[in-house]
Image (cartoon, coloured by chain):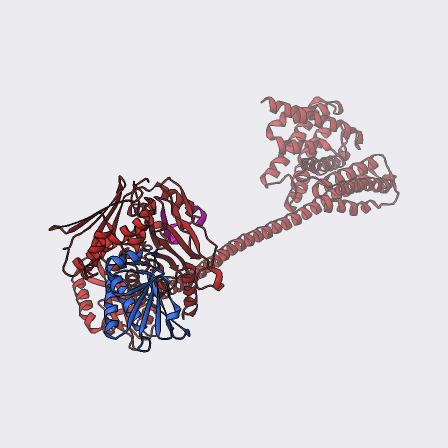
Chain colours: A red, B blue
Amino acid sequence: MLMTVLEAVLVAAAYYLSARLALRLALIEKNVTPLWPPTGIAVVGFLLLGRRIWPGIALAAFLVNVPITPTPWVALATAAGNTLAPFVAAELLRLVGFRREIDRLRDAIAIVLLASLLAMLISATIGAAALRLSHGIRSDDFAAAWAVWWTGDAMGVLVVAPFLLSLLLFRPRVPTSWARRVEAVALFVALTALTLAVARNHHPILFVVLPLLGWAAWRFQQRGAAPAALLVAGIVTWAADHDWGPFAHTTLFAKMLTLQAFNATVAFASFVFAALVMERIRAREALETAAAELEERVRRRTAELSTANRWLTREITDRRDAEHRLHLRERQLAEAQQLAHIGSWDWLIDDDRVTWSDEMYRIYGHEPQQFPVTFERAVEQVLPEDQGRIQGNVAEALRSTADRALPATEFRIRRPDGRERVLLAKSKLLVGRDGRPQRMVGTVQDVTEDKQAEREHRIAVTLQRSLLPERVPEIPGVLLAARYVPATADAEVGGDWYDVVPLPDGRVGVGIGDVAGHGLRAASAMGQLRMALRAYAVEESSPAAVVGRLRQLVALLAHTEMATLLYLVFDPETVSVTFANAGHPPPLLIGDDGSAAFLESVPAPPLGTVAHADAYVDATSPLPPGGTLLLFTDGLIERRGVSLRRGMARLKRHAVQARGDLDGLCDHLLATFDADEASDDIALLALRPLPIAAGSVHVRVPADPKALAPLRRTIRRWLREIHAEAQDGYEILVACGEACANAIQHPYGATEGILDVLLARADGEVEVVVSDSGTWRRASPPGGGHGLLLMRAFMDSVEVDTGVAGTVVRMRKRLADGGSA
Amino acid sequence: MSELARIEVASRGRQALVRVHGEIDLSNARDLSAAIEGAVRNDTPTLVIDLTDATYLDSTGVQLLFILAERLRTRRHELRLIVPKEAPIRAVLELTGLASIVSMEPSFDPGASEDGRPDAEAGTAG
């Protein structure tokens, strides 16, 4: 309510002020002007603020008219007309849907025809009538007054209303560029100047302003046209009032006619032209919007299409990749099958259709996919002796009502070229939903080579076993133990070997070696080497000579294999070893005091390599009392991921920990190896001189004449250790030899047995006891009876005790020096 | 050589000289005996066995020498032994009585040969 009053007062104030200004232009009396802006203000007020402001307008109109009308009644009537006319104008405009922007032709026409020309008839008629009735004017002036009033009000509406409305448009929706502002200013300056110029000119050339008005309407539409029209109308009205240029020396009517016609033309042309331009612009904008919209839709559709296209492309690529991967996998499967000699098959039981993989065909000796396969065809190539079993297995499987894997089975086939192959089949039966066997699938592996390899492996193992000594021979004066451990079961047989050769002169040859390579060939090469060593060991006294001759032999062998060899000769009399080494790990000397050292010799290359004939030289080392010599192949020191040096250090460490006899030592060393760690086979041989403790020794002597020589060497060692004199020693040696020879010659014959020889020295006396488990035969001793004679001659006492368990010969002799040692 | 004993055979005119190196026992006596006997030819009626380098001789060896001497006697051949005086085996030969049927000299006397053409012929026996 307060707002309404405030607005009404504001509108009233504007009305009043503009009226006072306009009255200065009055042409008739003091109250009829050619241009009456308050009417335009009132129309705009009604349009913008609504009907409710009418009291403000009525009051303002009354106040304006009171001083210029003869009576208050006339002022009141005039005010009523002046209020009613803009009210009707606004109502009419609202009725026809007038737009304030005047941007349509119909709006321009509406404001010209309805709001100004038609509605203003009301105020002109009421005002002129009131003036006449109050005798403000003469009756013959009535028409002129009415006309001036009407045109003044109409012009007020026509010129002022659009201008005021156009001010509203100056709230710019888009910022105005500097160029446009300069253009606007230039236009108005030019328009003002031109209008003033033509208005002061005596010739009637007012119309030349029209192009500039057109410019304003065209370039700035209503925002330019309305102010321009107001400006021009204002200046020309002023010119008419002051009798300038074209308005001088004419009648009032002519002046009015010219002025109003000009103003009407200006207003009408401006608004219509501006409205037309606006309409065109809006049409263009609409078109542009539509075009942009269309463009946007096309763009969006294109984007959708391109997305779809990308998706499709990716789909195609994915599919191609998948196909490629599938092909790759198929090929990999085929290659894997080919490599592993595994074929796969699939049997559709009801259709009796068998699908074979390419490798199946190859295994059966055909080109891949050469012919269609049926069950009959699949078993056709199976050897008759295996066919029954296969068919039986299948028949039994077909009775099954649930999926089941069949046990793996081996069978043989014959290829078209006649060759036999051994196949390992694994298969599975698949049962359908109805519980009936539907498919059988499986693989077939060609294991012919594996079988062959398995057989070869068995042969090689057997061969190697047979080539190694069944057990270490019993040799008087020396203790021996040996082990051979093949590499893990799946690995091939190695070429590790050892041998103990009792030499005729009583010494003991010991060889250990490693033939490079595995399998049958290595095993047979090893056998040849071992036999050759046995022969050369007897012929040659020096180990270096033996190794040298073996080098020559290996060079002559057809398939030259590289082989390491350590050959040593142990002398039970001197208790020392002489050895030559061809690229083999050195022997380890383990003392009974916790020490251990490798016996180094001049390094020499393995057999089978280019080696100088003189490369091998003898090295000699005494064995300390209680010492043990360990010979081994590299399997004992070589372990995965461990250096040779560390392997040897490790062996030393474990070797000194072992206590007890040689078998215990060997087992201890092998126990330090996990079975998994054994990457190579291991040969191991331990040698220890027979211990002599406190002047006594116990010698085990095989019942073999060949054992007599080492026995004598042992006895000589013992004699030396008890410091016996040479003559005494020789006599004891002969007596002991005679006792043993007698036992060997007679009780055992060809069978093997062991004599126990006990040699002891106590209180300057020597006792020799020879026991056997046979029967002492006096009848025909080997020496024709001389043996017993010699024993009795050389010894102080000889007792022969023949019992059920065997014979014991006990001999005693007092030493010449009285046993000072 | 790793043999227990080996022999060297030489011909000294009508004498056959056999040198024995090493030890003679049950294991090699028979083979040695055969080898030595093979050295005797009809044109060498005297066999001289040099035992200077024989380090061991047991009753088996003595027995074989008895047999050899007996055989040579039937063939009208003569057996002579060379055994140094200080040799340990001398006691064995004397105790068994071989010394009483076979002549034993401390060293080889080349004067006993008719011509001194040396004809070495080596042989071994296990």
> Looking at the figure, which quarter contains the N terminus of chain A?
top right
Q: Position of residue A455 (x, y in %)?
A: 28, 65
Relative horizontal placement of residue A738, taking residue B54 as reference (left or right): left
> Looking at the figure, which quarter contains the C terminus of chain A?
top left
Task: Give the quadrant of residue A447.
Answer: bottom left
Residue placed most toward the observer, A133 or A49 = A49
Residue placed most toward the observer, A667 or B18 = B18
Figure disc tally: 0
Q: Position of residue A63 (x, y in %)?
A: 71, 23
Residue placed most toward the observer, A601 or A430 = A601
Q: Residue furthest left?
A: A804
Q: Residue furthest front?
A: B111
The residue sitting at 78% across, 36% down in the picture is A234
The residue sitting at 29% across, 69% down in the picture is B79
Look at the picture and state if A367 lies above or below A193. below
Residue A425 visible (yes or no)? yes
Look at the picture and state if A284 lies above or below A253. below
Residue placed most toward the observer, A757 or A499 = A757
The range drawn in magenta is A626-646
Relative horizontal placement of residue B119, taking residue A484 as reference (left or right): right
Q: Is residue A635 magenta?
A: yes
Q: Position of residue A172 (x, y in %)?
A: 68, 38
Relative horizontal placement of residue A403, taking residue B22 as reference (left or right): left
Residue A374 visible (yes or no)? no
Q: Position of residue A672 (x, y in %)?
A: 34, 45
Relative horizontal placement of residue A608, taking residue A782 as reference (left or right): right
